[in-house]
Amino acid sequence: MTVKRETSGEEKLIERFFKPLAIHPGALNLSDDAAYLSPPPGHDLVLTTDSTVAGVHFFEDDPPETIAKKALRVNLSDLAAKGAEPIGALLAISLPGNFDEGWIANFARGLGEDCIAFSCPLFGGDTTKTPGPLSISITAIGKVPSGKMIKRSGAKPGDLVVVSGTIGDAALALELKKRLLSGGLGTLNKPQAAELTRRYRIPEPRLALVAALRAHANAAMDVSDGLVGDLGKLAAVSGVRAEIDTAKLPLSNPAHDAIAAEPALLSVAITGGDDYEVLAAIPEARFAAFAEAAGAAGVPVTTIGRFSTGEDVSVLGPGGQELSFENASFSHF
Amino acid sequence: MTVKRETSGEEKLIERFFKPLAIHPGALNLSDDAAYLSPPPGHDLVLTTDSTVAGVHFFEDDPPETIAKKALRVNLSDLAAKGAEPIGALLAISLPGNFDEGWIANFARGLGEDCIAFSCPLFGGDTTKTPGPLSISITAIGKVPSGKMIKRSGAKPGDLVVVSGTIGDAALALELKKRLLSGGLGTLNKPQAAELTRRYRIPEPRLALVAALRAHANAAMDVSDGLVGDLGKLAAVSGVRAEIDTAKLPLSNPAHDAIAAEPALLSVAITGGDDYEVLAAIPEARFAAFAEAAGAAGVPVTTIGRFSTGEDVSVLGPGGQELSFENASFSHF
């Protein structure tokens, strides 16, 4: 008897839900062991990988669409901060036994929307079962003109400390979730709370800024582990000191209201992480041009301080006093 | 007060154990958000990602060195089957709470040995905690001369079905482990059992074959989910039929003895998976040259059948009868 070829459950899953996302010709419709990529001439590739795990980076009961989007976007955020445009991504997903097809369909739909929105098709992937929580590892590949990747290490004394968007929303969303039983955050109304939650679940990778960053930034990184700690990393690898003034911190309306009602939340906002905004060192003479380019790209940018000679980070509080922190940034260990 | 910059536990872990593996200049000593890669001119890149999860792909109490090696090698095996030489890899590792530094040190040592042995430095990575089992996702990047990646889809009627190395060792190692309390496999002695276990824990990526494969193969893939099922995938995407004769199957000494003592184990050997050998379609006129090149590279290769017009896979048993299988290959779902 001949072994009649039957398509396995794993193949069906890939065929049905992930193949439509693999529109790059090198992805070979996900029907091969690997993908190929003919590198764009005159460019370097930029490579980054980030995992998101249920119960650590998102909540298991978050909508599958937002879980997918966050898993991709935290990687795209790294590309954006490096001045790189996405080329594609590889997805490794470990599914617990209790997943259902409806969940996967919604996950793939969310991922597919972002693959299109950010021109980042799926190059390949791996689907396995796990006895543990849902885990997603994505590797994103981007491109920059040769030699033009923006590093963390280029900040110079005198450069301005600049951030995109608003800081603290995701960390405040987590704090809000923790306090759900004890009355929430200050007097935030429902739309304000929803806005914070949206920022936690669906970060906005600042790919619109890549041209402006490549044209003007001496150094950049994305803020994922908390502003103060991440600024410390950038300053350390650049060999400079950074001073920021929290009075200048760009806050969303709900973050502003939450901190106004409970000033101690400022510390949560600037150390909590999950912002996925760009932190950049911009020479003062270039800032006007950078801000104009960023504005034209639809992304607000704000100067919150300055780099200088020396080391460490100084954080000026709202009353002009210097602040200190027990944990300046998030660390898994 | 200034925020004195303190290196986090996560940074220390990366600094101490993984930075020494990141010898590619584009890895920036793992001190940035991303790595850059100036693509080798005249080449395509080959991209693959595979996860390994404790309790699924390896045993939690396997030696950390072999866990690391297997996690990398299953990816290198994909590159080898595509005719690609490694350039580098990205590592995303999720560690349960109970890991200790000694474990990590041994894991990194094993990984480092393979990074050197296979010229595959670490480009970057991500280290997170997980409430679940140890999970490792690796993305490997390789290169082939432009347009020369060997696909699954090129097998032609008349091509020989060729495999590298020996088939079934890892699947028999798993069977052996299952039966530990009931007396093991037939009359295998301790060194034989150890040899099977070694093949399960540390597969051999057939990178030594890449030049020979590029010169002679019409199609190739690596055998990870079982020979019969994987051959079915290759035949289906190539639009051909495959016939193999198990009497020609290359078996290791312990696999040979185990199957001789218990003929039903043949089915385990050819459907169980985890072989990480290369399965290739070689035109008959090229086989002598292919085998000579493979021999010169130190890798035995064996013809086990032939592709023909039609579809499905036919497996001839030792007595000349056709075999059938309940599950021709491993699928997670």
Image (cartoon, coloured by chain):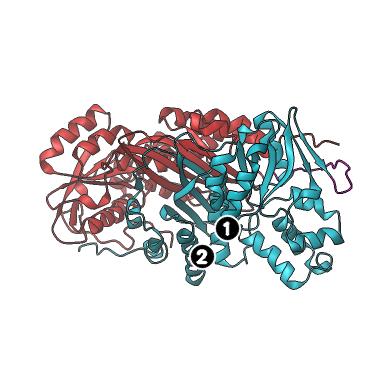
Chain colours: A cyan, B red
Tell me the kind of residue under disc 2.
Gly
- Measured as percent of width and height from the top left, residue A109 is found at 48, 67
Residue identifier under label 2: A110
| Secondary element at image label 1 | helix
- Quadrant for the C terminus of chain B, please: bottom left
- Does residue B222 show up? yes
Q: Which is more N-terminal, label 1 or label 2?
A: 1
Q: Main secondary structure of the magenta part?
A: loop
CA–CA distance in space, label 2 to label 1: 10 Å
The magenta segment is: A317-332
Task: Say yes or no: labels 2 and 1 on the same chain.
Answer: yes
Question: Closest to the observer: A298 or A257?
Answer: A298
- Measured as percent of width and height from the top left, residue B279 is found at 26, 45
Classify 10 Å Cα crowding around label 1: few (below 14), some (14-19), many (20 and above).
many
Residue identifier under label 1: A70
- Measured as percent of width and height from the top left, residue A264 is found at 85, 53
Residue drawn 64% across and 39% down?
A282
| Secondary element at image label 2 | helix
Question: Closest to the observer: A308 or A222?
Answer: A308
Chain letter of disc 1 in the image: A
Relative to residue A325, is residue B62 drawn left or right?
left
- Does residue B185 show up? no
Residue drawn 52% across and 30% down?
B21
Numbered mark located on residue B195 in the image: none
